[in-house]
C-alpha cells in the first residue's frame, strides 16, 4: 500500500507523514538574508516553485553561501521536479553551510528553526528514495536536539526494514496521540505492518477499526483498507471504501484510489468503467513530487487494460516504458525488486500476445510478407527470451514468486497470474503453488484461485484430462466478480475439452468466452473451432475466406460447433461475421478496403479487421446509461472506447 502520500494496487500500504515540514512564518532573522531571500521564501510558501528556482539560482550566482537560496533550490527540485538526488544534494549542502556558521547543534533561534526544517526535508527525501537506514539516522540526529520527536515518521522505515516489533510498538504508541493527523500515522502504520507480514484478515480488520475510530475522515486509511479488502475477497467493500476515499474530508493520499477501482472493474470485465477509472486517474493527476513514485504504476494498469482489450501494440509500448523506468518505491510498502519482477512479467505477457497478433497478420499476407514477418517473429522471440531470463532472476529471490501466486498479496491480478507460468516456467510455479497452499490462512476462499492456476499448468503441460477436472472445479467456486479469470480459465478448459474429443463440454465454454472475454483466445494462442469459412460469389470475398482459413485463430471444418465465419461484400466494404447456431451473431468486422492497391492488400485489410474486432471484448454501453430505443443494450468496440479515453 502507500504512505499518506501513498497508494498502491494490491496488499502494500501507505505511510502517513503526519506533521510534514510546512513553511509557515519565517523567523525575523533570515540568517543574514536580504530582500531577495525574503521574496524567494514568499514564493516557496506560495508554491511558485519555478519562479523560486530561478530566484535561488540567481542569488547563488552572487552569494554561493546563501542558506536560504540553497534551501529554495532543494525544495524546487523536490516538490516541483521530483528530482530527488539533486534535492538531496542541495539540502545537504545547505546543512553544511549552516553548520559552518552556527555549529552542528546551533543555539540561535533562527538557526535552530532552519536546522529543523532542513533535517525534516532531508528525512522526507530519503524516505521517498527508499534509503531507510539513512532516513533513520537523520531522525536520530533530529531527536537528539529537538522536540517533539519524529517517532511518527519512524514507523514506515522500520516496517520497510522488516523491524516489525519496533514498528508495531511505535505505531501503537503514536495511535494514542490526541492530534488526529499523528494518530492517523500510527493507525496507518499498524495497517501497513500487518499487510507487509501478509496477514490478510488482520490487515483488513485493523483497517476497518482505524477508519471507524477516525470517523471515515482520512483518505489514506480508507484507500489502504480498500486495498486490504481485495486480499480477503470483499470486492464490494473494496469498491465502497475506494469511492469513500475520493470524498474523504482529509486529503492525505498522495494519489487517488482510481487505480484500485480500475483493478476492480477490470477483473469484473466491466471494461467501460475500468476505462473511466483510468481516465479519472489521469485527469486527477499526481503531484509533481510523486510522479516518480506512481506514474509508472498508472501506466502499467493502462497497459493491462489495453492488453485485455486486445490492443497489444499500444500495450507493448507502455509495458516497455514501465520496464525501462519503474516507479520509485519509497512511498509504497513494495520492494523495488518486486515491482521490477511484475513489470517484466507484464512485459513478457504483452510481448507473447503481440507475437500471436503478428502471426495473425502474416496469415493473410503473400509469401514474401510472411517471410519478413517470420524474421520479425524471431527478433521478438529473442526479446521474450531475454525478458524471461531477467524475470527469473527476480522471481527466484526469497518468497517473491510464492507471494505473487497468492491472489491480492501483491499487485499482480489473479486473472493475469497465468503469465507467471510462461515467464518463470511451470516447474518453479508448481513448487511455489504447493508452498503457497501449505502456508495459506484462508484456504476455503483462496483454493479456487490456486486450482485455476493448477489447471493452467496442466493445460500447458498437455495433461488435458487433468486440466478439465481442475478447471471445472475452479469455475464452480470462483467468486462471481472474477470475470476475466473465469474467461481465461473457460478458454483453456474449452480447448482442453475439444482436444480431448469432448465437444459437448467445449462448446458452452467457447460460447461464454466469445461473449465476455474473447481476447483470452489470442492471449493463450487458442484456435476457435468453426464449421466453415464461407463467402458470397464475389471474388474478393472468396479471397478473404481463403486467407482466413490460414488464420491461427480459427480451426475450420469442425462439425457440431454451430459456428461459421461469413464474408460478404457491400460496395467498397468487406464484412466478416462470426455467427453461431440459430443465426446468433457474435461479432462482425466491417472494413472499407478501397485504400488497398491490390486484391492482396484488400484481403489483408479485411483479415486484420476481423482479428482485431471479432476477438476483442464488446463494450456494453448500458454501463454509460445509454440504451437503444427498444431498450436493448447498445454495443461498441474496444477501439471506440479507447479513443474516448485517450482523447483521440
Image: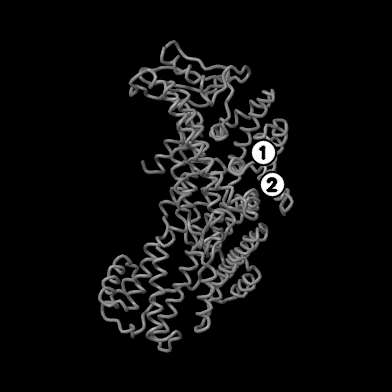
Q: Work out whether residue 161 can be spotted.
A: yes
Q: Are marks 2 and 1 in contact (CB under 8 Å)?
A: yes
* Element on which disc 1 rests: helix
Nearest the camera: 55 or 244?
55
Q: Is residue 249 visible?
A: no
- Viewed as shown, does residue 402 lie left or right of 571? right
Q: On the rendered image, what quadrant is the C terminus found in?
A: top left
SS of the residue under disc 2: helix
Residue 181 is left or right of residue 510, and the answer is left
| Residue 457 numbered mark, or none | 1
Residue 119 position by quadrant: bottom left
Residues packed near mark 2 inside 10 Å, few (<14), some (14 to 19) or many (20 plus): many
Residue 288 rendering spot, x and y as whole percentages: 40, 60
Q: Quadrant of residue 460?
A: top right
| Relative horizontal placement of residue 518, taking residue 116 as reference (left or right) | right
Give how far apart the Cα atoms at labels 2 and 1 are. 10 Å
**Residue position marked by numbered label 2 in the rendering:** 433
Asked if residue 435 is positioned above or below residue 315 in the image, the reply reads below
Towards the viewer: 403 or 234:
403
Q: Is residue 275 left or right of residue 57?
A: right
Amino acid at each position: 500500500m502507500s504512505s499518506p502520500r501513498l497508494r498502491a494496487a494490491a496488499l502494500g500500504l501507505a505511510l502517513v507523514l503526519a506533521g510534514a515540514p510546512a513553511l509557515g512564518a519565517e523567523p525575523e532573522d533570515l540568517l543574514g538574508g536580504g530582500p531577495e531571500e525574503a521574496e524567494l521564501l514568499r514564493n516557496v510558501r506560495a508554491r511558485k516553485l519555478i519562479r523560486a528556482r530561478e530566484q535561488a539560482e540567481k542569488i547563488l550566482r552572487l552569494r554561493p553561501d546563501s542558506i536560504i537560496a540553497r534551501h529554495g533550490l532543494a525544495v524546487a527540485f523536490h516538490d516541483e521536479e521530483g528530482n530527488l538526488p539533486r534535492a538531496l544534494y542541495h539540502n545537504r549542502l545547505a546543512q553544511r553551510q549552516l553548520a559552518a556558521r552556527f555549529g552542528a547543534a546551533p543555539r540561535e533561534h533562527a538557526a535552530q528553526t532552519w536546522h529543523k526544517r532542513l533535517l525534516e526535508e532531508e528525512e522526507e527525501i530519503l524516505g521517498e528514495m527508499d534509503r531507510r537506514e539513512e532516513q533513520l539516522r537523520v531522525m536520530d540526529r533530529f531527536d537528539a536536539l529537538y522536540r517533539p520527536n519524529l517517532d511518527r515518521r519512524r514507523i514506515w522505515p522500520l516496517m520497510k526494514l522488516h523491524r516489525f516489533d519496533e514498528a508495531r510498538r511505535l505505531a501503537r504508541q503514536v495511535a494514542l496521540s490526541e492530534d488526529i493527523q499523528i494518530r492517523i500515522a500510527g493507525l496507518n502504520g499498524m495497517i501497513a505492518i500487518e499487510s507487509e507480514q501478509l496477514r490478510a484478515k488482520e490487515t483488513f480488520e485493523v483497517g476497518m477499526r482505524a477508519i471507524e475510530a477516525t470517523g471515515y475522515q482520512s483518505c489514506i486509511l480508507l484507500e489502504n483498507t480498500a486495498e486490504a479488502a481485495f486480499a480477503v475477497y470483499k470486492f464490494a467493500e473494496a469498491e465502497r471504501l475506494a469511492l469513500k476515499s475520493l470524498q474523504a474530508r482529509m486529503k492525505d493520499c498522495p494519489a487517488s484510489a482510481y487505480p484500485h477501482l480500475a483493478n476492480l472493474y477490470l477483473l469484473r470485465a466491466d471494461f467501460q468503467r475500468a476505462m473511466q477509472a483510468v481516465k479519472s486517474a489521469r485527469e486527477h493527476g499526481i503531484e509533481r513530487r510523486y510522479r516518480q513514485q506512481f506514474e509508472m504504476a498508472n501506466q502499467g494498469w493502462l497497459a493491462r487494460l489495453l492488453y485485455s482489450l486486445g490492443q497489444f501494440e499500444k500495450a507493448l509500448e507502455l509495458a516497455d516504458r514501465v520496464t525501462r523506468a519503474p516507479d520509485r518505491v519509497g512511498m509504497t510498502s513494495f520492494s523495488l525488486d518486486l515491482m521490477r519482477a511484475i513489470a517484466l512479467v507484464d512485459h513478457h505477457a504483452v510481448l507473447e500476445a503481440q507475437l500471436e497478433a503478428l502471426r495473425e497478420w502474416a496469415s493473410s499476407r503473400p509469401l514474401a510478407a510472411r517471410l519478413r514477418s517470420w524474421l520479425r517473429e524471431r527478433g521478438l522471440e529473442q526479446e521474450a527470451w531475454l525478458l524471461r531470463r531477467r524475470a527469473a532472476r527476480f522471481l527466484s529471490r526469497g518468497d517473491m514468486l510464492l507471494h505473487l501466486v497468492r491472489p491480492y498479496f501483491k499487485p499482480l491480478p489473479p486473472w493475469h497470474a497465468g503469465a507467471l507460468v510462461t515467464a518463470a516456467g511451470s516447474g518453479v510455479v508448481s513448487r511455489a503453488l504447493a508452498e503457497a497452499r501449505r502456508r495459506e490462512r484462508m484456504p476455503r476462499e483462496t483454493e479456487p484461485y490456486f486450482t485455476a492456476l493448477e489447471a493452467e499448468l496442466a493445460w500447458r503441460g498437455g495433461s488435458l484430462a487433468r486440466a478439465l477436472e481442475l478447471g471445472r472445479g475452479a469455475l464452480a467456486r470462483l467468486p462471481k466478480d472474477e470475470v476475466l479469470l473465469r474467461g481465461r480459465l473457460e478458454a483453456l478448459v474449452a480447448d482442453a475439452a475439444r482436444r480431448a474429443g469432448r465437444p459437448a463440454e467445449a462448446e458452452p465454454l467457447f460460447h461464454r468466452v466469445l461473449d465476455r472475454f474473447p481476447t483470452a483466445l489470442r492471449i493463450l494462442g487458442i484456435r476457435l473451432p468453426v464449421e466453415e469459412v464461407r463467402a458470397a460469389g464475389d471474388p474478393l470475398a472468396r479471397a478473404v475466406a481463403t486467407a482466413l482459413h490460414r488464420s491461427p485463430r480459427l480451426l475450420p471444418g469442425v462439425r457440431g460447433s454451430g459456428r461459421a465465419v461469413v464474408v460478404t461484400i457491400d460496395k467498397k466494404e468487406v464484412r466478416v461475421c462470426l455467427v453461431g447456431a440459430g443465426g446468433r451473431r457474435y461479432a462482425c468486422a466491417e472494413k472499407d478496403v478501397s485504400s488497398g492497391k491490390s486484391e492482396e492488400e484488400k484481403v489483408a485489410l479485411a483479415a486484420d479487421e476481423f482479428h482485431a474486432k471479432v476477438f476483442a471484448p464488446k463494450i456494453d454501453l448500458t454501463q454509460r446509461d445509454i440504451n437503444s430505443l427498444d431498450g436493448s443494450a447498445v454495443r461498441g468496440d474496444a477501439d471506440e472506447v479507447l479513443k474516448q479515453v485517450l482523447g483521440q
